[in-house]
Each structure stands twice: as structure tokens, then as C-alpha cells.
Amino acid sequence: LHKEYRRQRQMCIRDRKKFNDTLLTLHEVQEIFRCGKRQAYELVHVHGFPAIKMGGKYLISAKALERWIQNNAGKGIIK
């Protein structure tokens, strides 16, 4: 029984590492891009921007945001 518990615990720890990512708020995205609230809201509505809305609050994966920035560097995204 003890060995089975330890094996399951190790599996849970491994699975948790797959989801080890920081979720940013819209305010933090404003700080990163040094933009205002209006531009940040425009940004989350850009097709392909890595934002999810949970209960009226936007959350952005830090890893996905980094990839998005690399893929869109130099492009005029919002006016």
C-alpha cells in the first residue's frame, strides 16, 4: 500500500510540472507593454493573443505571451 501511494504521489508531481506556468492579469500585461487599459483590452481581442476569460477576468499565460511576442515582433498589432 505504501509503495502504491508513493508511486501515485510521484505521478501527481510530474503532472503538476506540465502546468507550471504563471498566469498574468491584464494589469500585469499593461505593465509589460507600458500601455493603458484601453490598449490592453484591444490587445486581448486580437486574434491569436493568448488570453482566456474566466468570470469576467482576463488571464494570460506568461509562456504563451512570450511566444506570441516573439512571433509578432515588429508587426503593427493595434493602432
Image (tube, grey):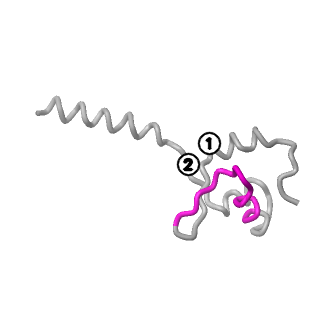
In the image shown, does 24 or 51 lie closer to the viewer? 51
Q: In which quarter of the image is residue 46?
A: bottom right
Which residue is labeled 2 in the image? 22
Queried whether the magenta region covers residue 49, the answer comes back as: yes
Residue drawn at 76 percent across, 39 percent down: 71
Q: In which quarter of the image is residue 73?
A: top right
How crowded is the residue under tag 1: few (<14 C-alpha within 10 Å), some, or many (20+)?
Answer: some
Q: What residue type is labelled 2?
A: Thr
Mark number, residue 63: 1
Q: In this view, does 62 lie above or below 30?
A: above
Residues shaded magenta: 40-54
Q: Which residue lies furthest to the front in this view?
A: 47
Q: Is mark 1 on a helix, strand or loop?
A: helix
Residue drawn at 73 percent across, 60 percent down: 30
Classify residue 78 as left or right of residue 11.
Answer: right
Q: Which residue lies furthest to the left in this view?
A: 1
Q: What residue type is labelled 1?
A: Lys
Horizontal and vertical percent position of residue 1? 11, 33
Queried whether the magenta region covers residue 17, the answer comes back as: no
Horizontal and vertical percent position of residue 18? 46, 37
How crowded is the residue under tag 2: few (<14 C-alpha within 10 Å), some, or many (20+)?
Answer: few
Mark number, residue 40: none
